Amino acid sequence: MSRKNRQYLLIAAIIFIALYAMFTLLHRPVEVKPAGRSTTSEVAVIRIPLAGDASYAYLEGSGLAWYGDNLVILPQYPDRFRSNGHSALFTIPKARLLAFLSGKNKQPITPRLLPFSENGVEAKIEDFGGYEAIAFRDHRTYLTIESGWGNNMMGHVVEGNMEPDLSMLRLNPVTLRNIPPQAKLSNMSDESLLIAHDKIITFYEANGANINPRPRVHLFDLNLQPLGTLPLDNIEYRITDVTAPDATGRFWAINYLYPGDRIKLKLAPDKIAARYGRGPTHTKFVTVERLVPFSYTTDGVHLVDAPPIQLKLIDDDHARNWEGIVRLDDKGFLLITDTYPETILGFVPAQP
């Protein structure tokens, strides 16, 4: 073998070793030593089968909300679906969901199309990246929107109006507001929102100690006039959606880690796992899928001193990108994924 060939082989070996070391680092489980109180329980997600357009991955479910007794499913790109010449969201009657969960009707559910008029909002946004969250206050509707490329991102919030018979949801472009991001991260913006005390509250997606040391929530009045910000407790991984708050201001957030985001998010130690422990599948895999309780107060949004609900994982190759959540009465939670690993509408029973 010539000297040149030996040099090529040496270079190739060095590259292989470096790539293998990087792969091992990215895919090894996060080591967390439980401290204080601990829980190791996990909850298996009960899948609710869907039929029709809403069953395909291109639904890209971004948010869930209740409009009366109807579940509204927000696709990231409503223009992929058509109803009476308009883009469309989807709805499912609560009674149909309860019938499935009680065993009275186990057939797949075909959501109804809800005509949607963005009314020129998308044309006002450079590099429109889709809708991310939805909430209702009577017939008034509030949605967050993401835009931008690479690290040049922007969040937005806009108001709309729902026809009482669910015949149309229309946005009002005059109400569109920008929400600057809190870190230089691709594909990250204010992805979640809730309504509390006559205020619209939006949440940035990345709130870890290393990537966003002093996270804030943005506040708006019901007409989307800015009301400043409030502090938010640091939490690792991503917040992808939140429930409506209860009468005490308590709500639940989806807290999710996709293994490929570990370096991007510059992860700090997971204080929640350190305090409450990690369930059996969470000790085995890098992925994190859990629901975390928060409380909204006049001085900020704070973690509640209570265990998270850890979802039983499949594996790191099938991390479920949960991006929509609502409570289902006192029975538990409904969740929906955005594309990966496929469209899944799931039910998580309430824990004692």
Image (cartoon, rainbow, N blue to C red):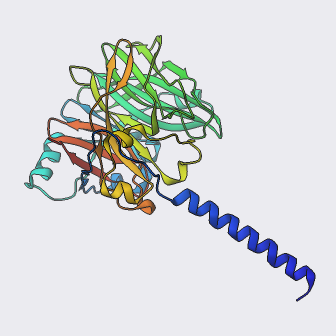
Against 215, is 127 above or below? below
- State left or right for residue 181 relative to residue 310: right
Considering the image in quadrants, where does the N terminus appear? Answer: bottom right
Residue 240 % position (x, y): 42, 38
Q: Nearer the viewer, residue 72 or 162?
A: 72
Q: Nearer the viewer, residue 189 or 233?
A: 233
Against 138, is 36 above or below? below
- State left or right for residue 189 relative to residue 283: right
Residue 28 % position (x, y): 50, 59
Q: Residue at x 24, y 26 (%)?
A: 164
The total number of labels drawn is 0
Q: Residue at x 46, y 11 (%)?
A: 225
Q: Residue at x 13, y 42 (%)?
A: 95
Could one spot residue 184 in this view of the protein? yes
Q: Nearer the viewer, residue 252 or 28?
A: 28
Considering the image in quadrants, where does the C terminus appear? Answer: top left
Residue 250 % position (x, y): 26, 25
Residue at the far right: name it.
3
Residue at the far bottom: name it.
1
Q: Nearer the viewer, residue 247 or 226?
A: 247
Could one spot residue 83 in this view of the protein? no
Residue 295 % position (x, y): 31, 23
Residue at the far front: name it.
36
